[in-house]
Image: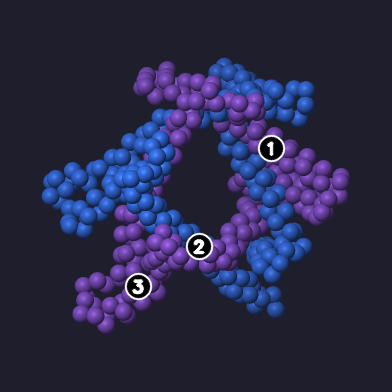
Chain colours: A blue, B purple
Amino acid sequence: MELFGIWIAAFLTLCIYSFLYKDNPFYRFAEYLFVGMSVGYGIVLSYHQGFIPFAWEPFTDVFTGESLFGLIKLIPIGIGLLFFSGLSSRHTWLIRFPSAILIGVGCGLAIPNVLRANIFEQTRGTIEPFAAINAGTLSGMEIFGAILMVIGVICTLTYFFFSVEHRGPVKWVSKVGIAFLMIGFGSAFGNTVMGRVALLIQRVDFLINDWLGSFGALF
Amino acid sequence: MLLTQFSPHSLSQGIYEEVLNWARIITPFALVFSTITLLQTHITRIRRQTEHWQYSFLVFAGIAIMVVVGIPFGPQNPVFEWLFNNVQLPMDATMFSLLAFFIASAAYRAFRARNLEASLLLITAVIVMLGNVPVGDLIWNKLISLTPWADTYPDGSSWMKQWILDNPNLSARRGIILGVSLGVISQSIRIILGIERSYLGGGD
């Protein structure tokens, strides 16, 4: 079964790499199968890790007499079922209820979490090294890095600040912000390239060692 | 959800957890509904026999195989795990690795040093790429060995990469994160107050 799995994986890998030549039936075969299997995988995970533990199990506890609290789960189940009103053109407006609840929960979660993790923590991380400078525990290079960090954050934010016209000093500060952004994009690009190349190496390694290596077991 | 953040009381935290669970219950229905929409799209393709319509059967087959095995027996089932490890995972990794080839042509266009900004992008990307691989340090060490500072700055390629990631790169990312976060908060407040209703499909 393991050998069969290696051959299936190798066939699908080669099918996808055949796209490097041009679009062809083998690539389309793998592409459409990939879409279907990914959707199926998502449904299975969502069912077993979302619906079963959070809706079905508390609901069945009502019948076993463990807890009546599970009855309340009928409300989100009912709200979730409203999604299927989208299949009827007359009742499609009902889909607004589950959408509004999900978006409301998302917004309610986003405000405190974004404030805490992305604004307070990032601001703290930017100015915290200055306490260490005051305590005299940072090296010259680290002090330079701390000052550069504050300059970079202020200049980048200035570039995205459109409430004032970018003229005079603001223009130059935002130009420095662009330079920092380019360094950020460059490093992100470099990391992305290396990540993709690492995946390519892994797939080529699989084809050479696992797949070609399996020829010995066959012949 | 917002108000519960201001009270550590068990009732408040209970409400928070319950509302979160409601969202977790409602989300799978959205996924099933979107799958039905996908199936409808492919049924229409087959009915109208548009270009490559035959491949739509593969989408049905992919969904059916995973659901038939996964729903009754769970994701820990050996057959489901075999399908994931030998069919889905290799295709996923290969699809992403395919981008390595296309990113090379994108790099050619992005990395042409036409002005200061493009040059900064080029230099940073080259340093980060070289710093990620052992050959980067090998090149650096060979070059530095020709100078009097051979022992002072070993492995400078990976050191420079790390310095760029920790300082100018992080400051740019922090600026972006702060800007995006302020946008998320203002948009969330607009949605909560009913000023922004476009997600309901009303058009305003």
Question: Residue lying furthest front in this view?
Answer: A168
Against A51, is A29 above or below? below
Residue under the image location 22 percent in, 55 percent down: A144
Measured in 3D between alpha carbons, the distance from the residue under mark 3 to the one under mark 2, in whole angstroms, is: 25 Å
In front: mark 2 or mark 1? Answer: 2
Task: Name the residue that disc number 1 marks.
Answer: B34
Measured in 3D between alpha carbons, the distance from the residue under mark 2 to the one under mark 1, in whole angstroms, is: 36 Å
Residue A155 or residue A147, whichever sits in front: A155
- Can residue B107 be seen here? The reply is yes
Residue B110, labelled with which disc?
Answer: 2
Label 3 Cα neighbours within 10 Å, binned few <14 / some 14-19 / many ≥20: some
Q: Is residue B154 left or right of residue A60?
A: left
Place of residue B46 in the rendered image (x, y in percent of width and height, measured from the top left): 84, 47
Residue A163 found in image quarter? top left
Against A216, is A189 above or below? above
Q: State how many labels appear.
A: 3
Residue B163 found in image quarter? bottom left
Residue B137, labelled with which disc?
Answer: 3
Asked whether disc 2 touches disc 1, contact meaning CB atoms under 8 Å apart, the reply is: no
Place of residue B171 in the rendered image (x, y in percent of width and height, measured from the top left): 34, 49
Place of residue B146 in the rendered image (x, y in percent of width and height, measured from the top left): 27, 82
